[in-house]
Amino acid sequence: MKLGLKYDEVRIVPFDSEWKVEFLNVKQEIQSVLEIDDNRIEHIGSTAIEGISAKPIIDILLGVDDFHKIDKEMEKKLRKIGFYRLRVERPNEVVFAKFTNETFEVKTHFIHAVSFKEELWKNLIFFRDYLNEHEGERMEYANMKEDYFRKNNSPNINEYTNFKDEFVKNIFAKRLL
């Protein structure tokens, strides 16, 4: 298993069952420094969806009491296991990344710290679970991503994210039905 993407690099690789093993290893590392309940650390993103291609980065959802109150102490603890807070501005979340080395050029893992069991937490968990339970939509998502890469030689992360946005929001909407 080879993880990692450079800044603004976007590519997908075939599903790898080792992604789940890697998540579990990193989950233990996070728990060792944060002393956080098991149910507050979840594997999300395409690497958590069975059988589909994904960006080779492990996405981890971290449920905190209030993402506005993530402090220097938490940042220091996560830095001990190689995670650094990014300057990414995202609504209702703080993002940390782990890199392959001290050059900070290639990211291998993301932690998305969000308020536990609030809207974003529920949507991200639902998206993962829904696609794992519904083969039709899972394959639609996989095919859509693969088609995108066949048609776009050098996409950037914003283009790719915007491309998937409508599909993702449609799945989120199913949670409220």
Image (cartoon, rainbow, N blue to C red):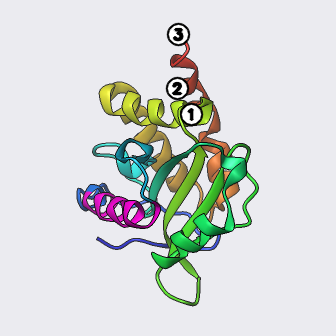
Q: Say left or right for 16 vs 78.
A: left
Amino acid at dot 1: Val
Q: Is residue 75 magenta?
A: no
Q: Are marks 1 and 2 in contact (CB under 8 Å)?
A: yes
In the rendering, at what x and y percent does residue 96 appear? 59, 64
Quarter in which the N terminus is drawn: bottom left
Q: Residue at x 41, y 46 (%)?
A: 42
Q: Residues within 10 Å of mark 2 (few under 14, many from 20)?
A: some
For the magenta stretch, what is the residue range?
Answer: 21-34
* The one of 133 and 60 positioned closer to us in this rendering: 60
Amino acid at dot 2: Ile
- Give how far apart the Cα atoms at labels 1 and 3 are: 15 Å
Residue identified by numbered label 1: 168
Could you tell which of marks 2 and 3 lies nearer the N-terminus?
2
Q: Name the main secondary structure of what is drawn in magenta.
A: helix
- Give how far apart the Cα atoms at labels 2 and 3 are: 10 Å
SS of the residue under disc 3:
loop
* The one of 80 and 141 positioned closer to us in this rendering: 80
In the rendering, at what x and y percent does residue 86 appear? 67, 67
Residue identified by numbered label 3: 177
Q: Residues within 10 Å of mark 3 (few under 14, many from 20)?
A: few
Q: Say left or right for 24 vs 165.
A: left
Q: Residues within 10 Å of mark 1 (few under 14, many from 20)?
A: some
In the rendering, at what x and y percent does residue 171 appear? 52, 26
Residue identified by numbered label 2: 171
Tell me if residue 16 comes above or below residue 147 in the rendering: below
Q: How many marks?
A: 3
Q: Are marks 2 and 3 in contact (CB under 8 Å)?
A: no
